[in-house]
Image (cartoon, rainbow, N blue to C red):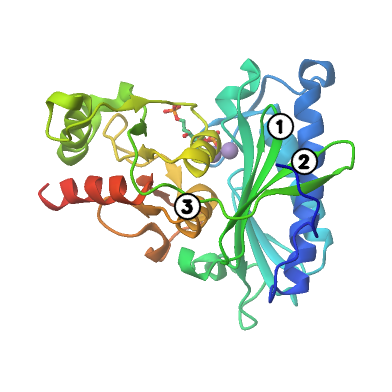
């Protein structure tokens, strides 16, 4: 149901933070436009470059990163940014009060098949005692986030946003040119019968995850006593959006397919902002062993195992990790 309301204002939220969010959303509207143009704008396909994560960059990864970087640093309220597509942090205004981390384009493998992709972002407080080019200023636990969100470039362009007062969903109204509030309190049901995981990695998971999924797959006849359905969009932003809309469990667990990279998702660009959104909607988020937002990062590009979604299901999955 469409409701016109002050777009981002919420009681007690810092006006500078609101204006920074509006700037990020302006860049996302531009990304949405470029995405919608697809092949017409020549934005599909790969570049010849690899990012710091060792992944081939898609043209859209680079375009989205440049757009976001430019507008965020221009605000003057941001001390530094850290992006999945940048080797190191990029300093901004030394007196800026905020740090911004982002995954400019999540779901890169979906770009060329006209499937779901998105932008994920997180805002942290800047430490006045650190230099703007000091990467250690970013090494804050997810609990320190001031705001987090994603913009999903789907059939509708949607925004999920939290400033720690619940999770709200907005829809981009292209006739009006802005995001309108369409769900004031996203609420993840506590129980679910839907899971999202890349089953092709099954044989590489740790024993706890193997047993958890094996029990789900036994359905009514197994220990869980009900049938589960599976969905996999291959873009965390799409899978988490479904979880915010109707519940479910999403997992990208540790796997030993490439022992040099046991975890896939990035703590600061993906796991922390998504965990904040999910927890604020009544869900839970864990590595299997600890709450994701409690992890104090040791590196800006750190990766982490992720299990998030409907609270009871996440707690059940975490239970399997207690017995190895
Ligand atoms: P990115 O496109 O930013 O590199 O992230 C892709 C991530 C995440 O969005 C998704 O859940 C996962 O990779 C998909 O992994 P598979 O290739 O194993 O399906
Ligand atoms: Mn991503
Ligand atoms: Mn990405």
Q: Residue at x 49, y 26 (%)?
A: 233
List x then y, in percent, for residue 306: 37, 46
Residue nearest the observer in this picture, 281 or 196:
281
Q: Say which element carries label 2.
A: strand
Image quarter hosting the N terminus: top right
Q: Position of residue 283 (x, y in %)?
A: 41, 53
Q: Which residue is mark 3?
A: 278
> Label 2: which residue?
172
Relative depth, front residue between 250 and 258: 250
* Residue designated by label 1: 156
Q: Is residue 283 above or below residue 38?
A: below
Q: Is residue 25 left or right of residue 169?
A: right
Residue 182 showing in the rendered view = yes
Quarter location, residue 202: top left
Which label was assigned to residue 164?
Answer: none
Question: In this picture, is 256 found above or below 74?
Answer: above
Query: Mark 1 or mark 3: which comes first in sequence?
Result: 1
The residue under the point 70% across, 30% down is 60
Q: Residue at x 38, y 54 (%)?
A: 284
Secondary structure at numbered mark 3: helix
Decide: few, some or many residues near mark 3? Use Cα within 10 Å; few <14, some 14-19, many ≥20.
many
Q: Is mark 2 within 8 Å of ligand 3?
A: no
Q: Position of residue 176 (x, y in %)?
A: 89, 42
Tell which of 254 and 321 is nearer to you: 321
């Amino acid at each position: 149901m469409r409701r016109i309301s002050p777009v981002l204002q919420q009681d007690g939220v810092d006006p500078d933070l609101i204006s920074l969010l509006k700037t990020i959303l302006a860049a996302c509207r531009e990304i949405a436009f470029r995405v919608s143009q697809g092949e017409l704008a020549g934005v599909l396909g790969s570049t010849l470059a690899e990012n710091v994560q060792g992944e081939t960059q898609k043209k859209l990864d680079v375009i989205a990163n440049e757009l976001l970087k430019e507008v965020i640093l221009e605000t003057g309220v941001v001390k530094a940014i850290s992006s999945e597509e940048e080797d190191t942090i990029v300093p901004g205004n030394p007196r800026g009060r905020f740090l911004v981390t982002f995954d400019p384009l999540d779901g890169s493998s979906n770009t060329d098949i006209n499937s779901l992709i998105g932008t994920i972002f997180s805002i942290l407080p800047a430490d006045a005692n650190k230099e703007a080019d000091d990467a250690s200023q970013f090494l804050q636990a997810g609990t320190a986030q001031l705001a987090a969100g994603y913009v999903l470039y789907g059939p509708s362009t949607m925004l999920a946003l939290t400033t720690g007062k619940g999770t709200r969903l907005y829809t981009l109204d292209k006739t009006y040119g802005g995001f309108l509030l369409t769900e004031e309190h996203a609420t993840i049901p506590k129980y679910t019968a839907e899971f999202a995981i890349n089953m092709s990695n099954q044989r590489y998971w740790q024993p706890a995850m193997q047993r958890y999924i094996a029990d789900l797959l036994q359905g009514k006849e197994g220990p869980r006593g009900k049938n589960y359905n599976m969905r996999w969009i291959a873009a965390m932003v799409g899978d988490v959006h479904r979880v915010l809309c109707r519940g479910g469990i999403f997992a990208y667990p540790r796997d030993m397919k490439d022992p040099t990279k046991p975890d896939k998702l990035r703590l600061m660009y993906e796991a922390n902002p998504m965990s904040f959104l999910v927890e604020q909607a009544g869900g839970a988020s864990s590595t299997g062993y600890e709450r994701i937002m409690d992890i104090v990062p040791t590196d800006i590009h750190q990766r982490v195992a992720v299990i998030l979604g409907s609270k009871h299901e996440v707690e059940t999955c975490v239970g399997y990790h207690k017995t190895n």
